[in-house]
Image (tube, grey):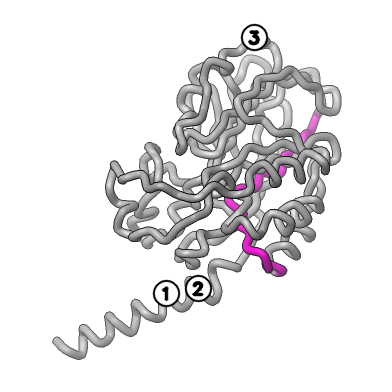
Amino acid sequence: MLRLVALLVVAGVACVAYGIAIERSWYRLRRYDLAILPPGGPQRLAVLHLSDLHFVRTDPKKARFLASLPTADITVVTGDFLAEPAAVETAVAAVRTVRGSSASWFVLGSNDHYEPKPLNYFAYFRKRRTRRRVLRGRADELIRGLVSDVWNDLANVRALVDVNGLPIELLGLDDAHLRWHDLRVAPRRAPDRLGVAVMHSPDTAPESAALGYDLVVAGHTHGGQVRIPGIGALVTNCSMPRRLASGLIRMGSAVLHTSPGLGTSKYAPFRFGCRPEATLLELRPRPPAAGPRLH
């Protein structure tokens, strides 16, 4: 029995060491093909989706990975640029290299607005957690830096835009995890356009899909951050079920992409079975009278 306990302890320590030393910075680019564009328009639109970057002040490996990514027509970042307020300048400089050739969009997450604090890991397994008083971060400075680099802040915004000749109805929602989202701006006004909804937490994805948005992009979950073989994600830190922690998900006629993200909280600097990733969504026309197809 003692030998079994010792083996389990050694295995646990090895998994944690692997998660800290290797997997949390084992970045990758994942590609998806989506037949979602209205017929008769552009034949291709590349969307680079990044989320939960969680930059610390010195983060060269993550910055190099971003610089290696292909240029997309649109780049969208769904929040949590920061792991600490001191990283504002680092984050702004790093994402400068991944701006879209035609459009660059972002929303913020709770870690951008507030300085992260240590948390009991077991608290993530409780449906209701006590909200603690935390210090304000440097969100205003982050927004100014991004906007000066021609990023568009989509917090509680609905707009009609055109990208490479494609008419888009664009919705951005502030962080539902903080309950700052405002669904009053969300109802569609131009259903003939491609509807794209951008948010940090996927908590508001079902409402966006029900309102007729075709593509919904979110982050926040880190894909669970720890995924056990045969079980999957242990938590999502939101209302979405664990099986929907990341990836492409059909929601009626809409498609939700929840990014596993590229970073972690500096107080939980590990991943297991859930590599950090950027995602390139290759959008192409759907067949006439057909819904979105996923590949």
Taking depth in this image into account, of 275 and 20 the one nearest to the observer is 20
Q: Quick check: is 102 in the magenta stretch?
A: no
Residue bearing mark 1: 16
Image mark count: 3
Give the CA separation, mark 2 to mark 1: 6 Å
Residue under pointer 3: 189
State the extent of the magenta-drawn residues as a range: 43-60
If you read the primary sequence from the N terminus, does the residue marked by circle 2 or circle 3 appear first?
Answer: 2
How far apart marks 2 and 3 lie (CA) works out to 47 Å
Instruction: Say if residue 247 shows up in the picture.
Output: no
Does the residue at mark 2 contact the one at mark 1 (Cβ under 8 Å)? yes
The picture places residue 65, in percent across and down from the top left corner, at 72, 62
Residue 219, can we see it? yes
| Residue type, label 1 | Val
Please state if 102 lies on the left or on the right of 85 as rendered.
Answer: right
Of the 4 image quadrants, the one containing the N terminus is bottom left
Q: Characterize the local packing of mark 1: few (<14), some (14-19) or many (20 or more) Cα atoms within 10 angstroms.
A: some
What amino acid is labelled 3 in the image? Arg
Residue 191 placement: quadrant: top right
Q: Position of residue 254 (x, y in %)?
A: 55, 25
Taking 136 as reference, is 154 above or below it?
A: above
Q: Which mark is residue 20?
A: 2
Determine the residue positioned at 43% across, 42% down. Answer: 244
